[in-house]
Amino acid sequence: MNRKSKTCPELSRRIQNPKWLGLSIIAFVLVVTGAVAEAQQQPNKVARIGILRANSPSANTSTGLEAFRQGLRELGYVEGQNISLDYRWARNKYERLPDLAAELARLKVDVIFTFATPATDAAKQATKTIPIVFVNVGDPVASGLVASLAQPGGNITGLTNISSDLSGKQLELLKESVPGATRVAVLWNPTNAGAALQLKETETAARSLKVQLQLQEARDPKDLDSAFSAITRKRPNALFVLADPMLFAQGSRIADLAVRGRLPTICWQSSFAVAGGLMSYGPSLTDMSRRAATYVDKILKGTKPADLPVEQPTKFEFVINLKAAKQIGLTIPPNVLVRADRVIK
């Protein structure tokens, strides 16, 4: 108590002393000024996002990417201010993906954003520490990318396009649109592990629908002409195009070849029908890509990928192109037409 009673009057006398008070104010100003100067010398960190894709920059591949960028903008990210994007395109040469993924890892980007199974698998092989967010992956568990959808583990998470009986629904729509169809050609890329898994699902669905499948491979864009020649020689009733980045990027060309061969064709990407194909049914790539931006945002704010469950699609699109139907001489049954989310005339 005595010590306190002596200290307080002494402090009071110092505060009342103009010289002591002036020196204190000067010291305070110097401290604040130094802190401000230090803050000005250390600008806000710019988050660096690596983007890895198996295909090439084109109109067919821009939709999902633009949706992702829009999602980032909606979350307050501005390119060149608080975020930067580093692109790596394999240009349909899947063998280039490991080197491109390694480049992004050496750049020490904060997050790698991947499209489809081939790019995601390459990113996984390149780094065990940099967070990876994917979209447009068929079955990430069966592909070995994550331990489970609920608890992905490791440094990878994202949004899968896997859905209960998606292949069955696509085949069913194709069969309903082409009454009496019993033989369906399947165009697929065997170098894509995700497409291989989808093929198994398609074969299971075909057995239940009593449809015979005719498999046709296409590993590169240059294979498409010969692939369609082989398909048309076997005279199938319709064509089913499996999900694949290379085939996705070649949507316009595939649509044109299908019309020339008078082949009713279905693909899951809506851009295929927009480009002139007969119909598409599948998860909305736009919706998934926009949602992927929220995963990146959470990771940049400290959440671990292992704590972000893999999300399954909730929004699907069924698009019919009546112009293509007319070109191949097909009338879409009314019961199929009314179920379309979008009809292109």
Image (cartoon, helix red, strand yellow):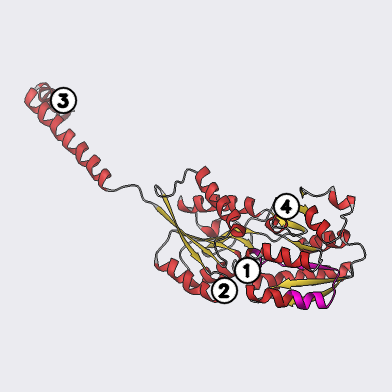
Position in image of residue 104 (x %, y %): 44, 66
- Residue type indicated by callout 2: Tyr
Measured along the vertical axis of the image, is residue 76 above or below residue 125? above
Q: Disc 3 marks which residue?
A: 8
Quadrant occupied by the N terminus: top left
Measured along the vertical axis of the image, is residue 202 above or below residue 157? below
* Residue segment shown in magenta: 228-248
327, 215: nearer the viewer: 327
Query: Is-magenta flag for residue 255?
Result: no
Q: Disc 2 marks which residue?
A: 94
Residue under the image location 54 percent in, 53 percent down: 295
Contact (Cβ within 8 Å) of mark 3 with mark 4: no
Query: Is-magenta flag for residue 243?
Result: yes
Check disc 3 and report its element: helix, strand or loop.
helix
Question: Gap in Å between the C-alphas at discs 1 and 4?
Answer: 22 Å
Residue 316, label in figure = 4
Measured along the vertical axis of the image, is residue 219 above or below residue 19? below
Mark closest to the chain's N terminus, 3 or 2: 3
